[in-house]
Image: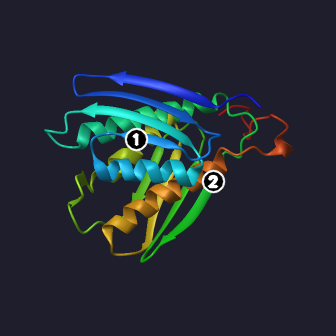
Amino acid sequence: MSERTATIERKTSETDIKLTLDIDGMGNAEIDTGIGFFDHMLNSFARHGFFNLDVKAIGDIMVDCHHTIEDTGIVLGQAISKALGDKEGIERFGSFILPMDDALVLCAVDLSGRPYLSFDMTFTTDRVGYMDTEMVKEFFYAVSYSAGMNIHIKQISGENNHHLIEAAFKAFAKALDIATGYNERLDGKILSTKGSL
C-alpha cells in the first residue's frame, strides 16, 4: 500500500498556509492557526479520524477569522484529494452519527469527485471563542469544493454551540476515515460504474 500523504502550501495577500496530511496516521496533530477554538476543532478532526495533520496558518485575524478558516478548508480539501490519488480500492462512502453530551450530529460523505455541501445546523451564538459560528459552514464548503466530495452534515439534536460544532468536526472525521478505508473485495479497483472518481 502506497503512502497516502500530501503537503500543500498556499500563500495569498490574506493568508499563508502550510498543511501536511497523512490519511493513514495515528491521530497526531500540530495545529497553529491563531484561532484557538479552530485549532481545537482541527485537533479533534485529526484525533478521531486517525489522520496525522500539521497546519501552520498565518492570516489576517486582526480583520476577522474568515480568511484563515476558509483558506485552511481549501488547503485541507486539496490535501485530501492529493493524498487519495485515483482512489483505487477505497470504500468511497462513509457516514457517522456522533453524540457529544446534548449534541447529536450526522455526517455522511461521498468521495465522488463532485463537490456538494448540505449543511443543516442552527447556532444560537455568533461566536465560540474567537471563531465565528457562521464559519463552520464556510469551512466545510471549502473542503467539499476543493476535495471534490459530497459532505452532508445534519444536526439531529442539541443546544450547546460548542458541543454541536465539535460533534460536526468529529462526525466528519469518522465518516472520512470510513470512506478512505480500503475494501479488499475491490482488489484495487475503483468503486464506480464509470471506472473513475
Q: Residue 62, percent across and down?
A: 14, 38
Q: Is any part of residue 79 visible from this angle?
A: yes
Q: Which mark is residue 185?
A: none
Taking 190 as reference, is 68 left or right?
left
Q: Give the residue at x 22% y 66%.
A: 125
Q: CA distance from mark 2 to mark 1?
A: 25 Å
Q: Position of residue 15 (x, y in %)?
A: 27, 28
Viewer-closest of 131 and 121: 131
Quarter of the C terminus within the rendering: top right
Q: Residues within 10 Å of mark 2 (few under 14, many from 20)?
A: many
Q: Residue at x 29, y 50 (%)?
A: 36
Horizontal side of 123 relative to 29 (left or right) equals left
Residue 31 placement: quadrant? top left
Q: Can the viewer see residue 93?
A: no
Mark 1 crowdedness (10 Å alpha carbons): few <14, some 14-19, many ≥20: many
Amino acid on which the number 2 mark rests in the picture? Gly
The residue carrying mark 2 is 94
The numbered disc on residue 31 is: 1
Say which residue appears at 37% left-offset and 37% top-offset: 72
Q: Nearer the viewer, residue 52 or 138?
A: 52
